[in-house]
Amino acid sequence: MASPARPTAAFFDLDKTIIAKSSTLAFSRPFQAGGLISRTAMLRSAYSQFVYLAGGADHDQMEKLRQFMSTLCAGWDVQTVREIVADTLHNVVEPLVYDEAVHLIEQHHAAGRDVIIVSTSGSEVVEPIGAMLGADHVVATRMKVKDGKYTGEIKFYAYADNKAKAIRDLARKRGYDLDNSYAYSDSITDVAMLESVGNAFVVNPDKELRKVARERGWPVLEFTKPVALQSRVKLPPAKPTLAALAVGGAVALGGVVWANRRRAQV
């Protein structure tokens, strides 16, 4: 008697794969409006968004981002951050989702596969987005917490090889057959993640990843239709509050400002 088939999964990067821009940098304006960063820092973030969309972030830029976010959130109350994100996240992210990505997620679910979002952004923002999209699990950057507040240290940085390791760990835990699973990403930093599965696809790839895709025969997908998420899934009603203006502060846990100046210098 043949043994039952092992479960499979589809692993999706978030930014420029499901979301049409950086899910975290998109919050720079509400972050500034809430008084959490200066206008200079907001403009720097806007410029970084342009660089990110035009060519993708390289390793050095991501390292600067990691260093900055590890100091920026020190002392923030975890519950307050989560409440702000829950109240306002869909107002920023809703118009940014790629219709093609949502359709792919639906197809994988229809085929019986789990859908996992794997993102360098903070879990405080990735988890609610995953819930909106019906993801079965998320892998995201996690900050250390003590007495209900962020310490400023990073517990797990979901970047580059760490993404691939998290996928393998999850596969062992859930029994996924990675040879028959799928992965989607736009960035050269996710090559290890794409190599972890038998079916790798690149989405709106940066120049370096496009070259790798040609060399390895990975299919290239072009997503071009950002749509309102509300048109595809039911979202909770908006709750505009004064505190909600600080949502960018929460999102900085995943890297909202492309800078390496310490908080006291901003």
Image: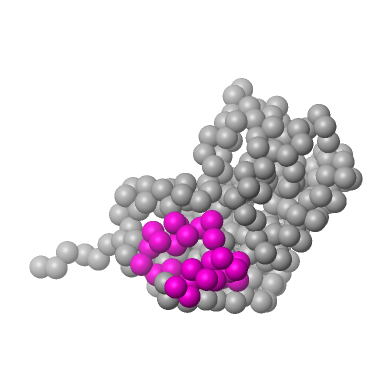
Vertical side of 118 occupied by 74: above or below: above
- Expressed as whole percent of the image width and height from the top left, the position of residue 258 reads 73, 47
Identified at 57% across, 35% down, the residue is 154
48 horizontally vs 140: left or right: right
Figure quadrant of the N terminus: bottom left
Magenta segment includes 212 = yes
Magenta segment includes 148 = no
- Expressed as whole percent of the image width and height from the top left, the position of residue 242 reads 85, 43
In front of the other: 171 or 201: 201
Vertical side of 102 occupied by 31: above or below: above
Vertical side of 152 occupied by 240: above or below: below
In front of the other: 89 or 65: 65
- Expressed as whole percent of the image width and height from the top left, the position of residue 24 reads 69, 52
178 horizontally vs 33: left or right: left
Q: Residues in magenta?
A: 188-215
Q: Is residue 85 visible?
A: no
